[in-house]
Amino acid sequence: MTGRFLGASLMSLTFGMIAQPAMAQVAPTAPGGPAANAAAEPEGGIQDIVVTAQFRSQSMQSAPLAITAVSAALLDARSQTNVTDVANRAPSVQLSTGGQGGGAQTAAVAIRGIGTTDYQFPVEPGVGIYIDDVYYGVSIGSSFDLVDLDRVEILRGPQGTLSGKNSIGGSIKLFSRLPGPDADAYVEATYGAFDRISIKAATNITLVEDKLFARITGMARHVDGYMKLLDYGCVTGRDAPGGDFANAGNDCKIGTEGGQEIYALRGALRWVASETIENNLIVDYSRDRSEASPSKILLQPNYASGNNYITGRKSYTSYATYTGLPGTPDQYTLPAVSYMTNWGIANTLDIQLNDALSIKSITAYRRSSGENSWDADGSPESIFTNHNVFTHKQFTQELRLSAELGDFADVTAGGYYYDASSRLGDRINVEIVGLDFAFDDPFKQTSKSAFVHAVLHPTERLNITGGLRYTKEDKDFTFVRKSAIPGRPTHPAVAPLDGLSRSFSGSRWDYRIAVDYEIADDIRPYAQVSTGFKGGGINPRPFFATQAVPFEQEKVTSYELGLKTLTFDRRLRLNAAYYHTSYKDYQAQLLFCPDLSPPGLGNNCAATQNVSDAKIDGFEVEAELQPVPGLSIDGSVSYVDFRFTNINLASGLTADTKPQFSPKWKYAIGAQYDFDLGDTGTLTPRLDWAYRSSIESNAINNVAGFMQGHVDGLGLLNGRLTYRTPSRNWELALAVTNITDKFYYINKYDREAGFNSVNGQPGRPREWMVSLKRKFE
């Protein structure tokens, strides 16, 4: 893909979009619409961000729960382009992508120590990710790009009684910019390191004055891979199983990992039928043809060849060839890709029945499909190679009836339905144990829930919130196991799994009670207790039929005390929260399970099971300061103390085991200043620094043989310099990420005891980019 092709791919779309004039002058606002439409902003000081976390539009400062809201302007200022960038800047949130064979777009998310690390469909996400209030039900493909957003909301703590599907750890919600009467158009082109070339564009189109508006958004991006795949024979002069690559150049490079090639298009249609009826229809499509996630071997077994394939812990190189059964007649090579096609359609209908009653209907269908590969041993020889081909289809329907009972109460009641059908298959080769098979596993899931949510206002400053939800879920999983080589029998270890079906059914009541009181203007303490759960399922990774067993729901009860303040004439926003969480039936993927395995084969395991309870305590502080006009400083700090209790000792967990992907400490601070250049415009430098303490990638992380999934603490510094013309219609920006060029790992997977190997995923090195943006009012 060349820069010329990328630029041309959206050129006709771009010119068509910016040429459309905006005809209408005024249009009604969608009930419960985006923050940008919700309320008039006060002049000067820190601006309100209006959120919809409790079924209605309200200031983030008046919502009695821990929430981080990031506006579109701040996303741009921080150079945040995807969900990962935003999540890892928020307190108590950790998001890692591309690990353990799930593909570059797959996210392992944890909030306050609670989440999910497995991308397999029967294992539910612990943190819900939403696009325009539509829940995305799987981890594969959940690391979305941020294109033309109005805002991002991150809700911390269990969301068992609020919108969408049950989310035990919290929710990350993306809200698109909706059409309106103004043009609100732009075109932005970017060039940067690793031949980064991208173009984004969007515009509103008025179809019928005051009635019908459309918005079209397009994006294309290409970035070369930053991880070099090297030919071992070329580099060392030694033979490697499978032979050398004839196409290796003078630099011995045979390919790369980590490259991106992404296209996305979204269309929104907003129909203001009357003063009381509004309908918003959004259709989106993305095509991702990226390379495989970067991975390198950090610990290797003693190969019969005697070769050493470790290229150095701090180098962006690997000897991976994506080859299985090398040097044999059955040798094969996988495509080193992480492909995904994702599209969806969502319709939101708002009807104001009268001054007190309104109905909201959110109907959506999403479909994703793709393939990805993983060479876990990072060498020409083969320990573990994995190739996935997947599809996921889901239909969701949410209905809400909201009532305003005078000044005394706001009540919302409704129901939610989720129906999904998924399939994951292709080939797994675990050569160290002689296991090579093809799989093609279908999975079906339904979830139905009913809920009621009420906020009472006994006085003008006192609010009492209560919520209740009942959920019923059903899941069916079938194992399909065949020989990976036509004409040969299926491996006897997995042959008994072929055609085996397992089911899970469960139900759950969840509740929430909160009290908040504005003790003085814009100073609001609150207290709440809330519950949530993550659904049970079926172990999707059995090596033997005895491991094809179900696991139960995870359940939490969280107690939270918080304070929200906006003081010093709106120059300081300071929000804080303390929480205590009781965690039951923790789900973990075990790499050693003798109780589920044939005698002597307990190391051959990747079973998800309920292994422990836990207690979690922590706090979060977020602040924004504008001491003088033009200067803005924002920061946060969080602490998570996670302790396992009631441990099933057969699982390998101990009291010293750490939760996966959950740093104990996180800090972040950013600052920017607008230099007024008079008639020349403005110049805004910005710096952002974010730190997280060490994390563990493996569920079992403190016993011999499983201790190399440890990832050291990390602090990254990013910067941006932005020039705007006096009209602010032109914008030129230089951004640098990872300014200090720190080498670091996103994750490390310790398979020493099971597969005698450890591999890690290096993070991105220092990158620069220059962008030019033109806005059209």
Image (cartoon, grey):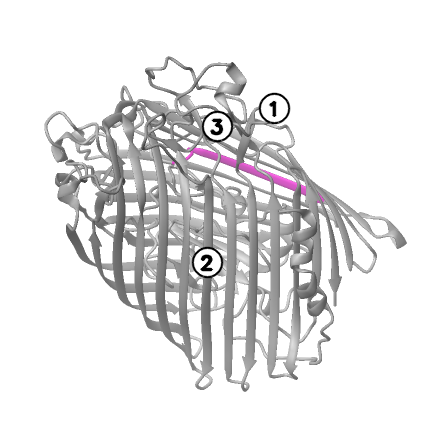
Identify which residue is drawn at 52% across, 45% down: 290
Q: Position of residue 419 (x, y in %)?
A: 30, 64
Closer to the eye: label 2 or 3 = 2
The amino acid type of the residue labelled 3 equals Gly
The amino acid type of the residue labelled 1 equals Asp
Q: Vertically, is 657 above or below 687?
A: above
Depth order, front residue of 47/120: 120
Q: Vertically, is 762 above or below 202?
A: above
Q: Position of residue 631 (x, y in %)?
A: 72, 46
For marks 2 and 3, give the CA distance.
Answer: 34 Å
Mark 1 vs 3: CB contact within 8 A = no
Mark 2 vs 1: CB contact within 8 A = no
Assess disc 1: are there few (<14), some (14-19) or many (≥20) residues with their C-alpha within 10 Å of its C-alpha. Answer: few
Label 1, on which residue?
Answer: 251
Query: Would residue 472 be visible to someone looking at this image?
Result: yes
Q: Which residues are magenta?
A: 661-672
Identify which residue is drawn at 54% across, 87% down: 274
Closer to the eye: label 1 or 3 = 1
Q: In which quadrant will I find the C terminus?
A: bottom right
Identify which residue is drawn at 47% across, 25% down: 319
- In primary-sequence order, the first of circles 1 and 3 is 1
Asked which secondary structure carries label 1, the reply is: loop
Rendered image quadrant of residue 593: top left
Looking at the rendered structure, which numbered label has been put on residue 342? 2
Mark 2 vs 3: CB contact within 8 A = no
Q: Position of residue 702 (x, y in %)?
A: 30, 24
